[in-house]
Image (cartoon, rainbow, N blue to C red):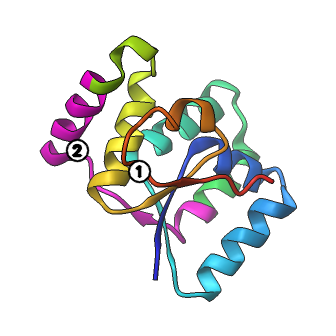
Amino acid sequence: MANYCLDSNVIIDYLRGNENIIRHMDEARKAGNLLSICPIVYYEIVRGFKIANASKQMEKFMSLYQTLSNLPFDMKVVEKAVEIYAQTHKQMIEDNDIYIAAISMVNDCTLVTSNIRHFSRVEGLKFVNWRD
């Protein structure tokens, strides 16, 4: 069994009906894998929909959210984020991405993202791209 943490771009792709993302998520669930979301991704998604006044998209997201496991944002995550920042500070990775990577690593999750460019810079982070 694997644990997956979904990045914002994956959730947006899912909500837009991306067939590859939907297929991979269905396959992961059928195999008994855990699909999770972290507070940073929740924040990114909800703030975007609120600013855009996109109530239908918000409803779709909240329906999906109810099916996902929640990952904690605690001091272990903050300590891991500091390590990641120290390792990558010259590569200009956004704080949100550092937190998402840290949450994934602390919780032994594979990050599902299409943002390979940023996340490939984080040593030890397991990630996959389900968009292709």
- The residue located at (50%, 67%) in the rendering is 68
Q: Of the residues shown, which amino acid type is indicated by label 2?
A: Val
Quadrant in the picture for residue 87: top left
Vertical order, 27 against 109 (above or below): below
Q: Percent from the top left, x then y, of residue 6?
A: 54, 54
Foreground of the two, 89 or 24: 89
As helix, strand or loop, the secondary structure at mark 2 comes to helix
Which badge, 1 or 2, comes first in the chain's sequence? 1
Q: Which mark is residue 38?
A: 1
Give left or right: position of 123 versus 26.
Answer: left
Magenta-drawn segment: 64-86
Q: Of the residues shown, which amino acid type is indicated by label 1?
A: Cys
Q: Which mark is residue 77?
A: 2
Inspect the magenta stretch and tell me whether residue 69 lies in it: yes
Which residue is outermost to the front?
123
Vertical order, 56 against 66 (above or below): above
